[in-house]
Amino acid sequence: MGETMSFNRKHTFFLSIIFIAFSCLSQEGERTAESLAPTHADAAIIIAKKSGLFDRYVADDASLTDCVTFLNKAGIYFGLMEVVNGKEFTVKDCARVMGQVELVFSGEAVFSYGKVILPKDIDSWEDFCTMNGVEYVDGYRALLDALRYSGRFRQ
């Protein structure tokens, strides 16, 4: 990730979530009809391989492990237990991930133990996203819409 990437990150990330979620979900493993939410594994694959943000660094045929490893090396944290155990990827998780992506691309990321940390004087990732125009709720809704559209999510 040494080369500079220039684009409107906020809009690109939101729009690419919509586009890539559809293609990713049609290619990845089956989800049961009873599934009610995206998992951390779903989010890691979509963000690493299909969002258009990291596709020059992560191959389209990269495994879940490859995606999680890449994101974690970049400071965008996906916990092993959350990914392996199929933990639900919540709106709060989406705010954290989108906030970490924003900080990495802006060059303003501060790392602690390999993770991008929340800037000082900000109480939550949700607050960070709101103050910086990162549309994390829309990004999460797009992920849910993609799951519904694919038939692998029901409410």
Image (cartoon, helix red, strand yellow):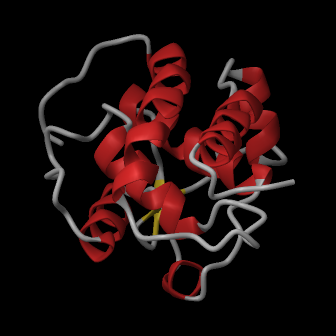
* Residue depicted at x 45% and y 18%: 12
Between residue 39 and residue 146, name the one nearer to us. Answer: 146
> From this viewpoint, is residue 121 visible?
no
Q: State the image coordinates of residue 141 (x, y, percent, origin top left).
A: 73, 36
* Residue depicted at x 62% and y 42%: 143
Q: Quadrant of residue 106?
A: top left
Q: State the image coordinates of residue 94 (x, y, percent, origin top left).
A: 66, 48
Quadrant (top left, top right, bottom left, bottom right) of the C terminus: bottom right
* Residue depicted at x 45% and y 56%: 76
Q: Is residue 141 left or right of residue 57?
A: right
* Residue depicted at x 14% and y 38%: 56
Vertical comparison of 29 with 85: above or below: above
Quadrant (top left, top right, bottom left, bottom right) of the N terminus: top left
Q: State the image coordinates of residue 103 (x, y, percent, origin top left).
A: 49, 36
Vertical comparison of 17 with 79: above or below: above
> From this viewpoint, is residue 44 visible?
yes
Q: Quadrant of residue 55?
A: top left
